[in-house]
Image (spheres, rainbow, N blue to C red):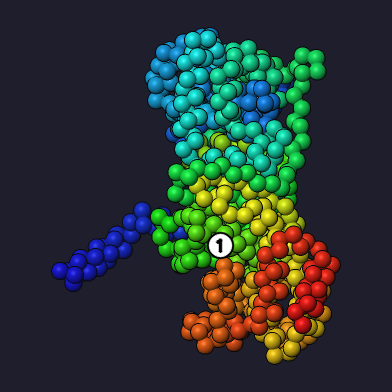
Amino acid sequence: MAASVCRVGSTVGKALAKARSPILLSLRRGQASVSYAQSLLGAPETRLTALDNGLRIASEETGHATCTVGLWIGSGSRYESEKNNGAGFFLEHMAFKGTKKYPQSALEQQVESIGAHLSAYTSREHTAYYMKTLAKDLPIAVELLSEVVQSCSLNEAEIEQQRGVILRELEEVEGNLQDVCLDLLHATAFQGTPLGHSVLGPSENARTLTRHDLVDYINSHYKAPRMVLAAAGGVNHDELVSLAKSHFGGVSFEYEGDAVPVLSPCRFTGSEIRMRDDSLPLAHIAIAVEGANAASPDVVPLMVANSIIGSYDLTFGGGKHLSSRLARLAAEENLCHSFQAFHSSYSDTGLLGIHFVTDRHHIEDMLHWSQNAWMNLCTTLTESDVARGKNALKASLVGQLNGTTPICDDIGRHILNYGRRIPLAEWDAQIDAVTPRMVRDICSKYIYDKCPAVAAVGGFCCSFGPFHTIVRGHTVSVCSNLSLLSLFQAHTAPTMRSVRVCFCLALLLPWCVQSQRSSHALAKLDEDTKRDVLAVDILNRSGVLNSLLRSEYQAVLRGARAPRPASQVPKRAQQGSRFALSLDVPTSILSVLIDLAKNQDMRTKAAANAELMARIGKRK
């Protein structure tokens, strides 16, 4: 049977080759002539026009039979006060409940009659109303969007009905623990500032917001200079501009008196917040430091860094074969159910962090390895790591723009954030310009010895010490830690060198021996110690020491046992190097190491040196 199939396939192939099918030839030409770079450069141009009132029109004509057109507005929960927080989300619900010209039933009939899809969303800095329809129905879509945004009826009966809908939605959102955790992260990281507000707002506001509050919100924020009419697909830009003049030319661009809303600055506060629920079997934890704003040149290297850390989900499988080191550890050691590195950029600040889901037994380990992944970005990043991250980021950016709706959303957000649409070719060039040195330096700028914000939701979060202290303690000065090696060099016998370095690096240091910050301190060590430091660092990056030393350290801290002699070390670790065998540490030195590791308040080099010398002196 197999042979006959092969013969049939061979016969068909010969027949097609003789026929010189135009289809086959066109496919071959396409594969040979169009490269990735050429496809980026050949992408349609985004045209931009501004009306006299300041409203901007941007479009990308792709030649599709369908199109997406929408209105993007520079408003969101960040522009709200504690009193009216949630007003933007409330308006999103009211938008499709009828206008002055079209009651709700007539509006729904208009949308359905052309086979369109009308939708909206609200974020912290943006609000969008958009419609996907056939390209020939673009005029109807623009008219309906104009009615929805400018002439929403805001009927009192509908407001009361939607109030109940929003309250039920708030209850449902409480079940999405990832969203709850990230909302809490914003609340603690930007506490006391508008960026800490939830997009949905508190339930108390949903009960008390009135029609007057909604009208005030529209009058304050729905102004022409803060609006972008964006479209993608089978659209003609000149036609879109003409439609915008007809339907949006009368949108106000003036404020009454001093009513111009000012975007108040938001400060980042290193802190933590926990929401305990013992009925939950898992903990959702998010740790973040302050990131770059949307227009910062540091955004692209940070995006590459996030791609290097990557993501992991237990249900996807294949974790042991992923290129992300943290994903491999998560799969091999069963550290978590899932994790995701993220970078949220806003107009003047951002959040760079990791969100993970795990059980009570692996919270501390997952915190440790997440921060270790951060410190590796600052120090031991290689050319291959960066190349992998750049390729993953490029694939993600291209994949996100699959269809007219994502393209239209990209256009609207870019015009609001940057004042122009950044083409994929420009993103690609910026990504190509990223080097390992650039990623290390920029990650050190944002991560190294910075105060993090931590949010935790679950039943076991409160059974551990302060997460904020654990996280900050892990990023203590590398130079201070390397200075501990030089002190041990003076106060311990030469025969203990491998033991000293093994434990110092495995338990105290974030393995930052290749960073510019630590090169000066490393130069002070003798040649044998330098060799030990570099060897242990290589072992660490290859994963040989990770599980062994971590479990050994935890067992000693719990008092479960004294350090095991080399003869009891598993053969898997013995095959790595002689340094992995150096676990027979004298009690005096080990106690100093454990005390230093447990003391999270030691911040400075001077304090660490003084504490270490005092303790070693007492134990002599």
The one nearer the camera, 258 or 106, is 258
The one nearer the camera, 450 or 25, is 450
> Which residue position is annotated with label 1?
365
| Quarter residue 435 falls in | bottom right
Q: Which residue is drawn at 64% across and 22% down?
A: 84
Q: How many labels does the image show?
A: 1
| Dot 1: element | helix
Question: Callout 1, which amino acid?
Answer: Asp
Taking the image as shown, residue 453 lies to the left or right of residue 154, namely right
User: Farthest residue in the left direction?
Assistant: 1
| Quarter residue 380 falls in | bottom right
Q: Residue at x 75, y 79 (%)?
A: 619
Image location (x, y in percent) of residue 289? 68, 50
Image location (x, y in percent) of residue 262? 77, 27
Image quadrant holding the C terminus, namely bottom right
Q: Residue at x 54, y 39 (%)?
A: 180
Q: Residue at x 15, y 69 (%)?
A: 1
Relative vertical location of residue 531 with respect to residue 392 in this rendering, above or below? below
| Neighbourhood count class around disc 1 (C-alpha, 10 Å): few under 14, some 14–19, many 20 upward | some
The one nearer the camera, 466 or 262, is 466
User: Farthest residue in the bottom direction?
Assistant: 495
